[in-house]
Amino acid sequence: MAIKRYTTIIVTALALSLTNSGCEKYLDVSPPFAQDAENYFNSEQDYELALIGAYDLLQASYLTIWIGEIASDNAIAGGESVNDSEGLHQIEAMTHNAVNNELRSIFRWNYAGIARTNFIMEYKDKTDFDGKEQILAETRFLRAYYYFELVKYFGDVPLIIDRRLGAEEVTEIARTPRSEVYAQIESDLRYAANNLPWNNPVKGKAEKGSALALLGKVYLYQNKFTQAAEVLDEVINDGPYSLMANYGDLWFAANEDNSETVFDVEYSNLEGGSYDCLICLEGNAAAGFQGIRQYEGPFYGDGNSYNLPTADLYNAFPVNDPRRDLTVLNLDSFISLQPDPGSISYAIGGGGHTGFYNNKYIKRQSELGLPDDDLTSPLNYKAIRYADVLLMAAEAHTRSNNDGPALTYLNEVRARVGMPAVNASGQQLTEAIWQERRYELSGEGLRFFDLVRTGKAASSIDNFTSGKNEIFPIPQVEIDLAGGSWTQNSGY
C-alpha cells in the first residue's frame, strides 16, 4: 500500500505463531533495534506507524480476486500449467483440501493483520493525544475487515481481541462460533462508523462510509436484512458517494479515488518486489498475473494468464450491455478489430485457456510499473464501491418486503450503463438483483461468496458439494500448530 511504505512495524513478532508467514518483511525493524510495548506507543507517530503496518496486510487482495472468481462459475485458474499455483486449480475443480498454499495464505495473512490491530488495541490507553479516537476507529475497521474475510472463508475461527498471545497459549485457543465472531465484527464496525469522518484527506484510509458499507455487507451475509437496509441507506442518503458517469473509466489507475470509491486497497508502481513474497509487494499482483501470456500487440501488456473468465460469464451478459466487454476481454475479437491483426501474437498457457481475460484488473501498457512489471501494477483493488452498496441495499430492501427502494437502487445501477429499467417485485425482483450483481461486479472477487450466501452455489458451480464447499477447510498446518485441538470443517 502506498500509504504505509515508511515502516513495516514489527508486530508480527508479537503475533500468533500460526500467522508467521516466513516473509522477511514481517521481521523488519525500523529503527534496527528491538522495539516492544515498553518503549513503543509513546507518541502519536508511534500509533500512526503501527496503524500503517495494520493496513499493510490488505495487500492480500489479489488472492481475494482470484479465489472469489475461480471458485465460482466466473473463471478458471489458468496459468502456465496445472502445477502452476496448484491450489488454485484444486479450488477451480472443487478438489481442494486442508493442504492448499493459497488457503493457508488467506488464513495466515488475515491473522497477521488482526495481530497488528490487536497490538494497537492492547496499548490504546498508553498515550493520549488529539485524534487518537480516529486511529482506534481505523484500527477496529481493519480488524473487522480481516475477521470478515476469515469467517467468509472458514466459518468458525479463533477470536482474539485487544491482546497478544504467547507461544504456549496458541495451542490452547479454540475455534469461536461464527456468530460470536460476527458479533465482534459488528461491534468494531459500529465503533468505527461512530468515530470516522465521511471524508478522510489521506487516500486509502477508512472512512465512515467504509465502515457503514462493510457493516451492511456483514448484516447481509447473516440475512439481517432490516439492519442491512438501514445502514446502507445511511451510506446512500448521507454519504458523499455517487456512480461514475462512465463505467469503463473505473478500471484505470488515472481515475482512482473517484466518487464511487467507498474503500479501496492502495497500490503503487514505484517499487519492485519478488515472486517469493507476493504479500510483500507494493504493486497489485492480480493485474500482471491476469495479463495475456507472451502478448505482443497494442494497449495491453504481457502477463501470466491467471484467473481467466469463462464463456459462461461472457455469454451471461445481454449483448447490448457495455459491461460485458469492459469486464471480459474477448482477446481474439479485440485483435480482429485492430489495424494490423496479423502482427499481434500471444501464447496459451498449459493451465487452461478460454479466450477471455479479466479486463478490470489487467496489465496495460499505459500503466506499467518498474520491472518486473508483473509485480508493480498501480491498480487499486476496489474493495467496496458505491454500485455494490446500491445493489446490497436493493437486496436488503426487497428481502425485507420493501420493493420500492429496491427498484430505485437497482435501476440506478442499470441506468448508468444504459440498460432498461426493471419492473418486478418479490422473488422475481430478488433474482434480478442477484443477476445484476454478476453483470456489475464480476471480476472483482465477489461471485463465489454471492453464490454461497444466496443458495445458488450448488446449481452454478461444477462439482460443488452442498454442506461442504460453502466454506473452505482449515489449513492442516494451522490445526497442527494449535496442538491438534481444532476440528476440521465438515467434509474435509
Image (cartoon, grey):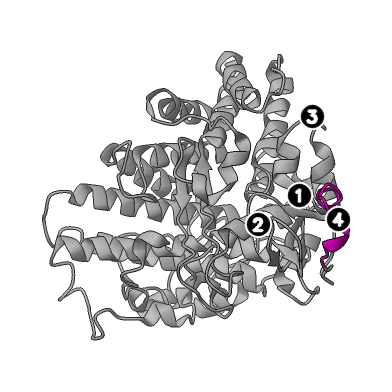
What residue is drawn where x is 88% and y is 60%? 342
* Of the two numbered discs 4 and 2 in the rendering, the one whose residue sits closer to the viewer: 4
Q: Amino acid at mark 4?
A: Pro
Q: Are marks 1 and 3 in contact (CB under 8 Å)?
A: no
Q: Judge by depth and name the residue closer to the eye, 243 or 33.
A: 243
Q: Judge by depth and name the residue closer to the eye, 179 or 16.
A: 16
Q: Residues within 10 Å of mark 1 (few under 14, many from 20)?
A: many
Asked whether residue 399 appears in the rendered view, the answer is no
Mark 1 or mark 3, which has the lower sequence index? 3
Q: Is residue 122 above or below residue 356?
A: below
Whether residue 336 sits left or right of residue 155 in the image: it is right
Image quarter of residue 61: bottom right
Question: Circle 2 is placed at which residue position?
Answer: 362
Q: Amino acid at mark 1?
A: Leu
Measured Cα–Cα span from mark 4 to mark 1: 16 Å
Q: Is residue 210 above or below residue 245?
A: below
Q: Judge by depth and name the residue closer to the eye, 25 or 424.
A: 25
What residue is drawn where x is 48% and y is 46%? 256
Mark 2 or mark 3, which has the lower sequence index? 3
The stretch of residues the image draws in magenta is 333-346
Mark 4 or mark 2, which has the lower sequence index? 4
Image quarter of residue 81: bottom right
Residue 341 numbered tag: 4
Q: Amino acid at mark 3?
A: Asn
- Element at badge 3? loop
Mark 4 or mark 1, which has the lower sequence index? 1
What residue is drawn where x is 76% and y is 66%? 295
